[in-house]
Amino acid sequence: MNSEGFIKFNCKRIEGNTCLPAKTFEALTKWRQIMYESCLIGAYSNGIGYGNISIRATADNFYISGTATGRLPALEEKHYPLVNSWSFSKNSLKCTGSINASAESLSHAIIYESLPDVGAVIHIHHKGMWDKYLNHTATTSADVPYGTPEMAKEIQKIIMAIKPNQDPVLVMGGHEEGIIVWGRTLDDAGEIVLKYYKSFLNEK
């Protein structure tokens, strides 16, 4: 992680129109707003953003909230670049759009690549929820650094082992506050986030 708090990875961006469909943008706007208002996506007092949201475009690419957008109360279409390809071994990706894809894109990519039925991924930050669910639901090893090729392998190993009756929730053991949720649709993923968030609030 560099001095500004961003994970070092190689993002090659092509300036261009992402052709974000209206219904896709509506779904992203709805759930990103819910996450932002719940402080599950946002920015810390030092200005560093946290959390992101993505939705599959085709079998091989996905839209994701762009880098350093956590501080923004609302996002425009230009804030969702299209991730076209990626390499876990090189810790790199290629995207199209007006801004770079989030540095956390590779964690989304490994889920889309491993689970063809998944259509959306939400990455939230919440210290209380992280403490509550750490090692009580699927959790990555605390020894695996976040934002590395090793983390992608760790995520893949764990999500492939999750049983059908388990919620699609993954706590990032080596990434304090980080929790990833996925679903067939953005509504599915969003409702799972709210289920765990409300459970946490009810037990406070």
Image: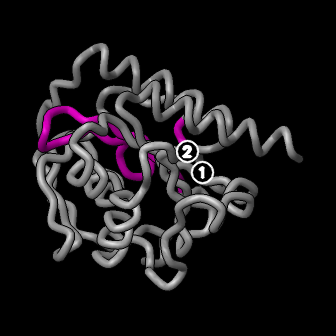
Looking at the rendering, in which quadrant would you find the N terminus? bottom left
Closest to the observer, 188 or 52: 188
Callout 1 amino acid: Ala
Q: Residue at x 53, y 61 (%)?
A: 138
Q: Quadrant of residue 64?
A: top left
Label 2 belongs to which residue? 71
Closest to the observer, 73 or 133: 133
- Residue 68 got which mark? none
Question: Of all residues shown, which one is farthest toward the bottom?
Answer: 143
Magenta span has 69? yes
The image position of residue 6, as x and y in percent, is 43, 67
Give the colouring mode of the picture.
one colour
Task: State if disc 2 and disc 1 touch (CB < 8 Å).
Answer: yes
Q: Residue at x 38, y 58 (%)?
A: 159
Q: Residue at x 51, y 50 (%)?
A: 169
Callout 2 amino acid: Arg
The image position of residue 2, as x and y in percent, is 43, 77
Mark 1 neighbour class, 10 Å CA radius: few under 14, some 14 to 19, many 20 or more: some
Instruction: Examine the rendering and report whether any part of residue 36 can be seen.
Output: yes
Q: Callout 1: helix, strand or loop?
A: strand
The residue range painted magenta reads: 49-72
Label 1 belongs to which residue? 43
- Give the mark, 1 or 2, whose residue is nearer the N terminus: 1
* 106 with respect to 42 (left or right): left
Q: Callout 2: helix, strand or loop?
A: loop
Q: CA distance from mark 1 to mark 2?
A: 5 Å
* 204 with respect to 34 (left or right): right
